[in-house]
Image (cartoon, rainbow, N blue to C red):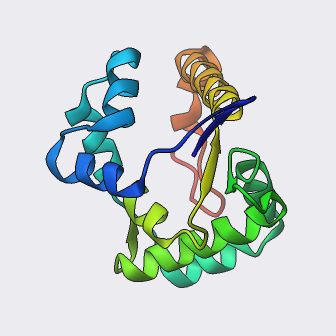
Amino acid sequence: MFVSGAFRRSIPVADLERLARTGEAVGLLGDALRLGGKEPAEVGKLLNHRVALPLVLTTRLLSTGFGENALEKLSVIVYPLKAPRVGMVALRSATILGLQTGSGSLSAVGFLRAYPNEDVAINLPALQSALAGLSGMGNVLKEFLESDLGSNLERVRPPGAPAKP
């Protein structure tokens, strides 16, 4: 379920799985991609992109303050439609179950399959805001790396490394 204020539209996970498998979008998903000017095959590749993560380490990380904070921020974007207060628990569960099912790797489709609630809400304005923030972070990082300070990073030695003569 994609949510934007009063606007709500459902796209079945089966349609996303089909797009990931065949590169062909049908129904509302096809219409949305066409309106957005996105190539279905490219979106299908994104849905299939797998990220390898160690299950035990990921489980531990999600239980730290950093992990809790990340889950809290993500639960504003992705949450169970009828129970938004349990968004953090649902995200943690989908991540861990998806990694377990995916033998240590996770894709968007695997995450959605593992999500413990049938109706997943994706808050589009919150998603756009988060993506814009990430884009801005990328620009800041790029500028830093291109600056004099960034170019001096290779001269900084890691802790415990001997100084170069």
Left or right: where 142 falls relative to 27 = right
> Residue 34: percent from the left, percent from the top?
32, 20
Residue 22 seen from this side = yes
In this picture, is 152 found above or below 79? above
Q: Residue at x 61, y 69 (%)?
A: 117
Q: Residue at x 26, y 43 (%)?
A: 44
Residue 107 seen from this side = no
When asked about the image quadrant of residue 124, the answer is top right
Q: Closer to the camera, 99 or 144? A: 99
In this picture, is 56 found above or below 64? below
> Residue 122: percent from the left, percent from the top?
62, 44
Q: Residue at x 64, y 21 (%)?
A: 136
When asked about the image quadrant of residue 123, the answer is top right
Left or right: where 22 falls relative to 42 = left
Q: Closer to the camera, 40 or 64? A: 40
Give the total of numbered labels: 0
Q: Closer to the camera, 150 or 43? A: 43
Q: Closer to the camera, 160 or 130? A: 130
> Residue 56: percent from the left, percent from the top?
56, 84
When asked about the image quadrant of residue 17, the answer is bottom left
In this picture, is 65 found above or below 70? below
Q: Residue at x 57, y 34 (%)?
A: 153
In this picture, is 14 found above or below 134? below
Left or right: where 35 falls relative to 63 = left
